[in-house]
Amino acid sequence: MRIVDWADESDGGPAVVLIDQRALPHRTVHLHLRTVDDLIDAVRSLAVRGAPSLGITGAYGVALAAHRHGTTSPDAVDAVRADAERIATARPTAVPLSLGVRRALTALDGGPAAVLAEARAVAAEAAAVHAAATDRAADEILRLCPGRPLRALTVCNTGPLATGAVGTALGAIVGLHERGALAEVLACETRPLLQGARLTVWELARAGVPHRLCVDSAGPAAIANGLVDVVLAGADRIAANGDVANKIGTYMLACAAARSGIPFVIVAPEETIDPRTPTGADIVVEERGADEVREHAGTLMTVPGTPVYNPAFDVTPADLVTAIVTESRAWAPSPAPSASVPRTAPAPR
Ligand code: MRU
């Protein structure tokens, strides 16, 4: 099952084909996107989501633009570049989206087929990178929490749907399960769009990983009550100083982990670390529409017209992060994650 792919369809021409993540877990629906406008709609509406999957989608989006406009005249090239810019800025926080777009644009001189080949390379490389990062993360977690079956807590969705491949944080969790080192995963439901409840639980069930679902606000309580050995999350953008933007709700888990002295580990491809973003204060956090919070499954849950604060992400300061694990390193961005906090988990209660 490819999460994002390319198809040359005899009836409708080239298309970016992707699983509509809005329909999961109840239905598996594939979208066949034949225009850049449709692709941008899919990105904005979270039909496709998760930082690495957005990178792959961005690269295929440029291939779609190159096939639509051609690349033989200056006007055509300008049109492809304009579409590429619209794709790259469709969502502001996740760094791989613009990287995938830029990477595909490097092949523009070679024509549409070369752009498509570059997009396919982005997808293939992502798979190898994520596999290396998740292996390293599993090793690192076993080092931090030795000698017992682990109880992990995670937020949002960081598995194949979010990455187009094995996953990041969820890939490491599945890896720990395959090594026989995992007792249970607590998955936070991830309000308001329920990526944890709808997507992570679906992926954990398919992988046969023991899990329970909890409301987001139960995450810190579970940590405080000794039910969690390690918190694992992905990242949408990591500032050069190690501050981490990830799904809203991540920061409270990092605070709780520091308070209880358990490791808080980020798993992400190295490209997520953005040298052009010095600190978390420089990260643009996407604010999403009010109805995502006011409504649930189309039913109004509050007073009509209630003003809403709906940031899609929060920023966890580097000093709360035990380790950022990528395909090439395990980086402790701050020498002391929290002055009084040990780096290894305490013995289970
Ligand atoms: O708004 P989303 O669903 O795109 O947010 C996704 C996340 O926050 C993920 O945790 C992040 O992209 C890491 S994915 C490997």
Image (cartoon, helix red, strand yellow):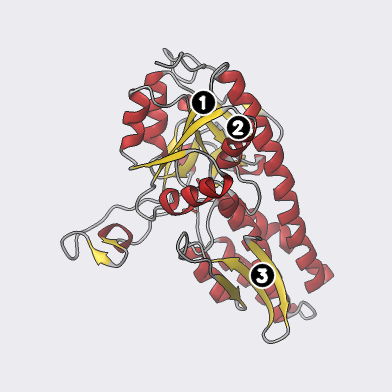
- Residue topped by disc 1: 150
> Which secondary structure lies at badge 3?
helix
Q: Earlier in the sequence, mark 2 or mark 3?
A: 3
340 relative to 343 in the view: left or right: left
Q: Nearer the viewer, residue 124 or 211?
A: 211
Can residue 47 be seen in the rendering of this structure? yes
> Which secondary structure lies at badge 1?
strand
The residue type indicated by label 1 comes to Leu
- In which image quadrant can residue 10 be found? bottom right
The vertical placement of 271 against 28, above or below, is: above
| Disc 2 to disc 3: CB gap under 8 Å | no
- Residue topped by disc 3: 81
Q: Measuring from the top left, give residue 256's x and y in whole percent.
A: 37, 27
The residue type indicated by label 3 comes to Arg
Can residue 106 be seen in the rendering of this structure? no
Question: Mark 3 and mark 1: span between their CA atoms?
Answer: 48 Å
Q: Is mark 2 within 8 Å of ligand 1?
A: no
Q: Nearer the viewer, residue 254 or 68?
A: 254
> Which secondary structure lies at badge 2?
helix
Q: Nearer the viewer, residue 343 or 216?
A: 216
Q: Measuring from the top left, give residue 101's x and y in whole percent.
A: 66, 60
| Disc 1 to disc 2: CB gap under 8 Å | yes
The local crowd at label 2, few if under 14, some if 14 to 19, many if 20 or more residues have their Cα within 10 Å, is many
Q: Measuring from the top left, give residue 99's x and y in whole percent.
A: 65, 54
- Residue topped by disc 2: 176
Instruction: Judge depth for marks 3 and 1 and give the one in front.
Output: 1
Q: Measuring from the top left, give residue 105's x and y in whole percent.
A: 72, 63
The residue type indicated by label 2 comes to Leu
Question: Mark 1 and mark 2: span between their CA atoms?
Answer: 9 Å
Question: Mark 2 and mark 3: span between their CA atoms?
Answer: 43 Å
